[in-house]
Image: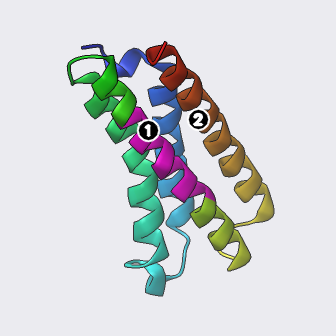
């Protein structure tokens, strides 16, 4: 068991969630229970699953939760693209958030590989 707060990938995931919450607050009101909710849940699932995996016993369990976090990051990638294409996000914001998400996926992939060696 390890302290998830010490992991850079968790820290980056947490910062992504904060950015997603801030940017999605400007989405249309009629998206409150649609895209706004979905992108917030998907983004928060990334650091949540990292934290849960750190609370489990063994590298196999941790790797499983990191894989779930990876899936959530892929979901965020698509939802950001959708928000941009619906003109809910400026292209600059899309690029910034997408780059953060891709970096988190890269970090998760490396972490998973290290655990499976």
Query: Which residue: 47% across, 56% down?
Result: 21
Check the picture and name the quadrant holding the N terminus: top left
Residue 27 appears left or right of 32: right
Asked whether 16 or 59 is in front, the reply is 59
What residue does disc 1 label?
A: 67
Residue 84 appears left or right of 17: right
Quarter of the rendering containing residue 81? bottom right
Disc 1 or disc 2, which is closer to the eye? 1
Residue segment shown in magenta: 65-77
Rendering coords of residue 62 (x, y %): 33, 26
All told, the count of numbered labels is: 2
Rendering coords of residue 70 (x, y %): 50, 42
Rendering coords of residue 12 (x, y %): 53, 32
Rendering coords of residue 43 (x, y %): 46, 51
Q: Is residue 78 inside the magenta stretch?
A: no
Of all residues, the one furthest to the bottom in this rendering is 30
Query: Which residue: 55% across, 56% down?
Result: 76
Query: Which residue: 63% across, 71% down?
Result: 83
Quarter of the rendering containing residue 56? top left
Q: Secondary structure at mark 2?
A: helix
Q: Secondary structure at mark 1?
A: helix
Asked whether 94 or 45 is in front, the reply is 45
Instruction: State how far apart marks 1 and 2 are (Cα).
Output: 12 Å
Residue 107 vs 14, above or below: the answer is above
Query: Which residue: 33% across, 18% down?
Result: 59
N-term-proximal mark, 1 vs 2 = 1
Asked whether 8 or 108 is in front, the reply is 108
What residue does disc 2 label?
A: 104
* Magenta segment, prevailing SS (helix, strand or loop): helix
């Amino acid at each position: 068991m390890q302290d998830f707060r010490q992991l850079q990938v968790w820290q980056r995931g947490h910062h992504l969630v904060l950015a997603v919450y801030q940017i999605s607050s400007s989405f249309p009101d009629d998206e409150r229970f649609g895209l706004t909710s979905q992108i917030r849940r998907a983004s928060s699932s990334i650091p949540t699953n990292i934290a849960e995996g750190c609370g489990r016993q063994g590298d196999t369990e941790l790797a499983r939760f990191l894989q779930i976090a990876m899936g959530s990051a892929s979901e965020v990638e698509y939802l950001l693209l959708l928000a941009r294409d619906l003109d809910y996000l400026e292209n600059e914001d899309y690029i910034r958030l997408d780059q953060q998400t891709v970096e988190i996926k890269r970090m998760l992939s490396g972490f998973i590989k290290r655990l499976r060696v």
